Image (cartoon, rainbow, N blue to C red):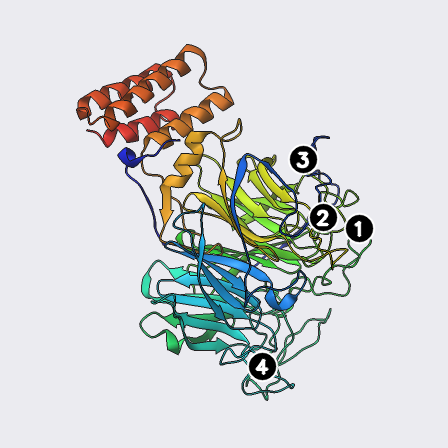
Amino acid sequence: MRSEQRPPNARRRALAAAGALLLGASLMTATAAVAEDDPRVDLPAGYLDAEVATSNIDLLSSTPRVDPFNAPPGDFGFVNSDLAFSGDNAIVGNFNGFQVYDVSDPAEPTLRSSFVCPGGQGDVSVYGDLLFMSVEETRGRIDCGTQGAPGSVNPERFRGVRIFDISDIDNPVQLPGVQTCRGSHTHTLVSDPNDAENVYIYNSGTSGVRSPLELAGCENAPASTEPVTTGNPTQWRIDVIKVPLAAPETAAIVNQPRIFADPETGAFNGLQNGPTQPLHPSGTRYSPNPNTNTCHDITAYPEIGLAAGACQGNGILLDISDPADPVRIDAVADPNFSYWHSATFNNDGTKVIFTDEWGGGTAARCRSTDQPEWGADALFDIVDGKLQFASYYKLPVPQTTQENCVAHNGSLIPVPGRDIMVQAWYQGGLSVIDFTDTANPKEIAFLDRGPINTPSTTGLNLGGYWSTYWYNGNVLGSEIARGFDTMALTASDDLSANEIEAAGEVRFDEFNAQLQTGAVHAPSFAVAGAYVDQAERDGSLSGEALAEVREHLAEAEQLADGSAADRAVVAQLVNAARKSGLAADSDVVQALTALTATFR
């Protein structure tokens, strides 16, 4: 969906071949050093009352799960999973269905409806009046019943992508979904800039292959280090589902591209293929042993014609100029990575961050004994269609052995002129990262809780943030065991009030993290102020010139708010640009010039 922005006067202050690049364990991490007095260290445990530590972000609200989605920590049948957003609604996926929160007031979200539909993993996405949900477990039923679907073959079983009509979001109607051979662990919406009548889904199933007696066409094949070139095995491919928007009930698989194939031999298993891989450098087994036979997450960016696939043993880059027929153009591997899990592009599509879910999200992987290259982010620049490794980033503070912690889901925060991401780390909380310089990522905000502990539970209890995403001015988080959180960034030396406000001016009608849409910043006083703040931070604007630019910019805004003649506003903005002494192509002058044009 296209982004839009409030007008300035509404501002509120307060190609198919791919080589595998092996990244050596000797590469240095760019993770920042941990301050000895970091408040995240040794946070007192609890459940809904665990101590919270924050830096440059405020926890606005924490809404606990309620029946029929509540259960003791660790009950996998009721885990909160991924998030999607539509209008003023946050849709929280759950292994038991989904919940809808009204977030029109982020400080006081309200649960407006719940829909029980078991089947895990429950990842959700939205497109107009349609809601899609991933279903992987064998208990999933076509009718969303809670009685399960016992037996190795059951005609009532549903594993695949559910489709709901949410034109009345309080009363969703399930449409015929699409059954798949390995279910749906995750799925990615892919729009086509040249086709407004259809949307596509890239489906990734990661579990066992169904019997052909239950779903025709399913064919199991064991993992193999030898080339696999015969038959039509369900592994080593993804599903491409076409959804006609005028008739979504007719959605169907239209392609199953073998995006891991060796272009020379035609072997389906052309990338990492399992048992020959060494132990993880930590001495523990990979989870699973890297066998690139499907993707975990694929993040599509249709506007630039690319998708990034986090695919078990590899990170891959796809050409999606034809959404129905994605083509691999590059692939990378890394002996430090256990399980390539998810991916995020920067706004201009020149960088991508891949995450490693070492331990599968259920293990403590942020201990002081774990190296910063393990269970971390790998940052890449995209140069001439190829992925070039730049650095690692890992949560820069150790977590306890009672906390499942590893890199997980996040999204961009649309600060003009910078690449900033908010990312979930399960019980490591969230970390806000500036990766404008991919070789030197830096944490600029965080929120963390103490370990989950209740009178009846001890040890490691599954919890923490599954996802933390920026949506229309706030950070919102799906907490696996505790519920749903809303947060607001606060100004600091690393992120100014102008930058936060400029990011908040970008508004989306809907948001799916795996369907990236470019953020466009309309000219505004906040955007101009953000670039001035950045120029001060990098030293290109200082002293008297900085003071005069700020004075003229503030005067222009005051005049604009007071409905003064446009020519008076223009005069102040022109003076601000002139007094800066910066080149015409500098970000500051360009932002001031664009803002000036809105008053001419």
Local SS, label 3: loop
Q: Which residue is mark 1?
A: 282
Work out whether residue 436 or residue 142 is closer to the camera in this orientation and state it: 142
First-in-chain label (3 vs 2): 3
Q: Which badge, 1 or 2, comes first in the chain's sequence? A: 1
Q: Secondary structure at mark 2?
A: loop
Residue at left 32%, top 38%? 522
* Near-viewer residue (219 or 105): 105
Q: Earlier in the sequence, mark 1 or mark 4?
A: 4
Q: Amino acid at mark 3?
A: Pro
Spatial CA span between label 3 and label 2: 23 Å
Q: Look at the numbered disc 1 and give the secondary structure of its residue.
A: loop
Label 4 element class: loop
Q: Are the residues flagged by discs 1 and 2 in contact, CB closer than 8 Å?
A: yes
User: Gap in Å between the C-alphas at discs 1 and 4?
Assistant: 42 Å
Q: Nearer the viewer, mark 1 or mark 4?
A: 4
Percent position (x, y) of residue 277?
76, 60
Q: CA distance from mark 4 to mark 3?
A: 45 Å
Q: Is residue 586 left or right of residue 458?
A: left
Q: Nearer the viewer, residue 140 or 29?
A: 140
Q: Which residue is mark 4?
A: 147
Q: Three-letter amino acid code at disc 1?
A: Ser
Alpha-carbon span between mark 4 and mark 2:
40 Å
Residue 122 position, x and y percent, is 54, 66
Left or right of residue 595: residue 111 = right
| Of the two numbered discs 4 and 2 in the rendering, the one whose residue sits closer to the viewer | 4
The reply to whether dot 1 and dot 3 touch (C-beta < 8 Å) is: no
Q: Where is mark 2, residue-wise?
A: 374
C-alpha span from label 1 to label 3: 27 Å
